Image (cartoon, helix red, strand yellow):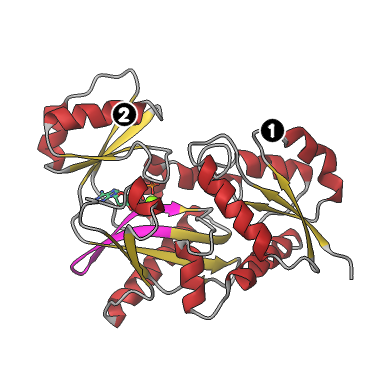
Amino acid sequence: MKRLRVALLCGGKSSEREISLKSGMQVKKALPEDKYEVIIYDPASDLAKLVQDASEIDVALVMLHGRYGEDGTIQGLLDLLGIPYQCSGVLASALAMDKVMSKRIFKMAGLQVPKDVVLRRGEPYNTAKIVAKLGWPLMVKPADGGSSIALNMANSEEELTQAIEDAFAHSETVLVEEYIAGREITGGVLGNKDLIALPIVEIVPQAKHRFFDYEAKYTPGATKEICPASLPEHLTQKAQAYALKAHKALGCKGYSRTDMILKEEEIYVLETNTIPGMTETSLFPQAAKAMGMSFSSLLERLIELALEERHV
Ligand SMILES: Nc1ncnc2c1ncn2[C@@H]1O[C@H](COP(=O)(O)OP(=O)(O)O)[C@@H](O)[C@H]1O
Ligand SMILES: [Mg+2]
């Protein structure tokens, strides 16, 4: 049987380049060689080659995070080249990447989100007014960031100003949010038309991390991930329903992972990731494993879903 030619896109230009390369290497290792011929393209250097090789490529696995990878740009290029891929299309990718836009959509879909103030680079802002609206502490984030990069908690006016400036160094739009104190959970969704909600994962960073920051995300052992999360059945169902609703509201395809905070009986949606981390121990693969799907089977399923979408 002819092997499927897979273009594995990893690396890229965003601040999450290193993480993407790590996902890419593990994905390559996990795909059985007798079925797949995997060719790696790093968009930072290999875009011309990708265009050249396009007619020979059966499917692309986009393992890029952040800007120029998860934001619809690469998806648009792949559409133009006629290469099917495992993740959401242009619109859903762009919407999910932009936390201001995606929160608007979540709200319209009836999902609860943290209250916020949106700041634009170059426009004046008044920290006292922000605090009056949102209280302390505050979470400050670039609108189109990821991996908690330039994302900070602020407990004083001084910290707030510093956090806003840090976030502006990464993005033209900055989101200041009320802090939701609760249990952090994340919900994966898999499928095109028939969607499956994966078991919910609870994320418990060590006490020295005040939230799921960059270090807590990528230092082995810094965070306990409990999968399936130990929640009462009705809250598990609610969280899964929220993940499905967020996925559908944005128009995602293939898979997604929605980050949420559970505060007593209430769930707040933080964001939806259209290309969740894909190392073997990442959250989405862990959740897949909890329902009996190995890392390799998950990747094969994503390839199947990508190809299925092409024939719709
Ligand atoms: N409004 C908030 N309330 C409490 N914690 C938050 C809030 N926003 C973000 N966080 C914390 O910061 C982490 C990263 O935020 P998130 O919005 O998911 O951005 P990223 O794209 O960087 O993952 C979350 O996993 C959570 O720990
Ligand atoms: Mg997140």
Say which residue label 1 marks: 45
Q: Which residues are magenta?
A: 258-272
Is residue 88 shown to the viewer in this render? no
Which of the marked residues, 1 or 2, is nearer the chain's N terminus? 1
Residue farthest to the right? Answer: 1
Say which residue label 2 marks: 166
In whole angstroms, how far apart are the C-alphas of marks 1 and 2? 28 Å
Front disc: 1 or 2: 1
Q: Nearer the viewer, residue 81 or 225?
A: 225
On residue 203, the disc is none
Q: Could you say which quadrant of the image residue 43 lies in?
A: top right
Q: Residue at x 29, y 79 (%)?
A: 234
Going by the image, does 106 lie left or right of 10? left
Q: Give the secondary structure at mark 2.
A: helix
Q: Residue at x 33, y 52 (%)?
A: 216
Magenta stretch, main secondary structure, is strand
Going by the image, does 197 lie left or right of 209? right
